Image (cartoon, rainbow, N blue to C red):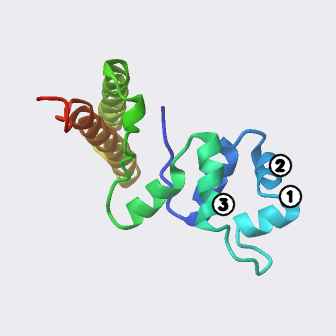
Amino acid sequence: MKSPVLETRKETMREIIRSYPDGREGAAVRLGMNVKKFDNHAYESAGCSPLSDAQVYMLEQISGTSHFPNYVAQMYGGLFVPVADPETLDNVELYARSVQVSAKRGCVDQAIAQALEDGSINEEEAEIILNAHNLHMAARHAEVLAAIDLYRIKPGNGQ
C-alpha cells in the first residue's frame, strides 16, 4: 500500500476526505455542516478557521486513517506510532502486525529497486523511499510495543 507524502495541512485534509466513506458529503454530514461550509473549514478558504483537531480526529476514526498525526509527526521530524489496545492483543494480532511490518519493508525495498533502475536516486525518489521507510519503522515500533505489552508480567499473575 502506498501512502502519499503529505507536506501541507491542505494535502492532509484532502487525503482524509478522500479516505472518508462517502467523501466530503459524508464528512460534512458527520460534522453537522453543509458541504460548502465543510469545504471552507477543511481547506481554510473564505476566511474560515480550520477544522478543529477533535473534528479531524473524528473523521479519521471513522475512516480508519492516521494522516493527520503522520503529518504533524513529520513536521517535527518524527514518526507517529499508534499504541495497541491491550484488550485486543493476542498472538493472532501480533502475527497480523508482523505481516504488516514485512509488507511495509517490502515497499521500502521496492522503492529502492525502482529508484535504482536508472542507476541513481533523485530527490523525488529519495522522498518516496524515506516516506516508505518511516512507515516501516513506525509499524515495526508499534509491533515491538505490542509484543512487550502482550507478554509483560502483569501484577497478580504470579510470575
**Residues at discs 2 and 3 in contact (Cβ within 8 Å):** no
The amino acid type of the residue labelled 2 equals: Glu
Can see residue 137?
yes
Residue at 26% over, 42% down: 141
Q: Position of residue 77 (x, y in %)?
A: 32, 63
Q: Which mark is residue 25?
A: 2
Circles 3 and 1 in contact, beta carbons < 8 Å = no
For the question of whether residue 119 can be seen, the reply is: no
| Residue 55 marker | 3
Question: Who is closer to the viewer here, 152 or 68?
Answer: 152
- Residue contact at pointers 2 and 1, CB within 8 angstroms: yes
Mark 1 Cα shell of 10 Å, populated few (<14), some (14-19), many (≥20): some
Question: Label 2, label 1: how many angstroms apart (C-alpha)?
Answer: 6 Å
Up-down relation of residue 117 to residue 12 (above or below): above
> Which numbered disc, 3 or 1, marks the residue closer to the eye?
3
Identified at 45% across, 54% down, the residue is: 70
Residue that extends furthest to the bottom in the rendered view of this protein: 47
Closer to the N terminus: mark 2 or mark 1? Answer: 2
Q: Secondary structure at mark 1?
A: helix
* Whole-number angstrom distance, CA of label 3 to CA of label 1: 15 Å
Q: Amino acid at mark 3?
A: Gln
Indicate the quadrant where residue 9 lies: bottom right
Look at mark 1 in the image and give the residue it sits on.
35
